[in-house]
């Protein structure tokens, strides 16, 4: 069993096991899975990411892979290393790592924001059908908010950040420099 509380010095990040950069999309997920499946079956597994964002559901898929395999293989320690920019879906992915397994390089910026939707709602037909269409759209928005807030709760668990603070700042895109994230105890260290 690995010790997830052990402090990791910078030299432990010299050769990350998994390197990811660019938009969080299905191409990134395929690259992630190839590297993830080839990763050592015990010890430290460093996952380095730099991204300006992307698909939050892909970020959740990658995060669930990390969470699931962490539970299944306690002899492995999955560690997140954010580099340069960790925006949007990148922050969602980082939220799946325990705080003691989150690291950022100097000057890295995190960006936290609400999920966005762009949808045109066409209302046309019998009134009862129109109500069903509007209700379905409302349910989609409510479910997306619930998923978003679960991610926010994972991100801030054990930190100095409150849910009220995230909900206040996220609609306007909340940017945090690595040292600010450290002060707020959202990460373990700045390298």
Image: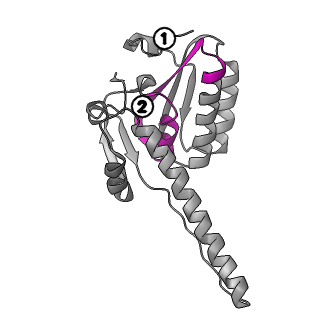
In the image, which is nearer the foreground, mark 1 or mark 2? 1
Is 71 magenta? The answer is: yes
| The N terminus sits in image quarter | top right
The residue lying at 31 percent from left, 28 percent from top is 106
**Disc 2 on helix, strand or loop?**
strand
| The C terminus sits in image quarter | top left
Q: Residue furthest bottom?
A: 126
Mark 2, residue position: 83
The residue lying at 69 percent from left, 78 percent from top is 132
54 relative to 64, above or below: below
- Range of residues picked out in magenta: 70-98
Q: Work out whether residue 44 or residue 130 is closer to the camera in this orientation and state it.
A: 130
**Disc 1 on helix, strand or loop?**
loop
- The answer for how far apart the CA atoms under marks 1 and 2 are is 24 Å
120 relative to 63, above or below: below
Percent position of residue 129, x then y: 72, 83
Mark 1, residue position: 3
Label 2 CA crowd tier, 10 Å (few <14, some 14–19, many 20+):
many
Relative horizontal placement of residue 72, taking residue 176 as reference (left or right): right
């Amino acid at each position: 069993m690995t010790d997830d509380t052990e402090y990791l010095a910078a030299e432990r990040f010299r050769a990350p096991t998994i390197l990811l950069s660019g938009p969080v999309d299905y191409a990134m997920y395929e690259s992630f899975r190839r590297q993830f499946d080839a990763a050592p079956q015990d010890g430290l597994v460093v996952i380095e990411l730099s991204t300006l964002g992307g698909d939050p559901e892909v970020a959740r898929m990658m995060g669930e892979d990390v969470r699931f395999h962490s539970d299944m293989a306690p002899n492995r320690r999955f560690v997140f290393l954010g580099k340069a920019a960790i925006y949007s879906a990148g922050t969602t992915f980082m939220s799946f790592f325990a705080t003691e397994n989150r690291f950022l390089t100097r000057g890295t910026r995190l960006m936290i924001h609400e999920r966005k939707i762009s949808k045109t709602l066409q209302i046309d037909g019998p009134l009862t059908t129109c109500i069903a269409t509007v209700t379905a759209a409302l349910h989609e928005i409510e479910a997306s908010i619930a998923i978003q807030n679960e991610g926010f709760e994972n991100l801030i668990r054990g930190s100095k950040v409150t849910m009220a603070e995230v909900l206040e700042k996220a609609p306007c895109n909340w940017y945090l420099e690595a040292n600010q994230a450290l002060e707020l105890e959202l990460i373990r260290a700045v390298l």
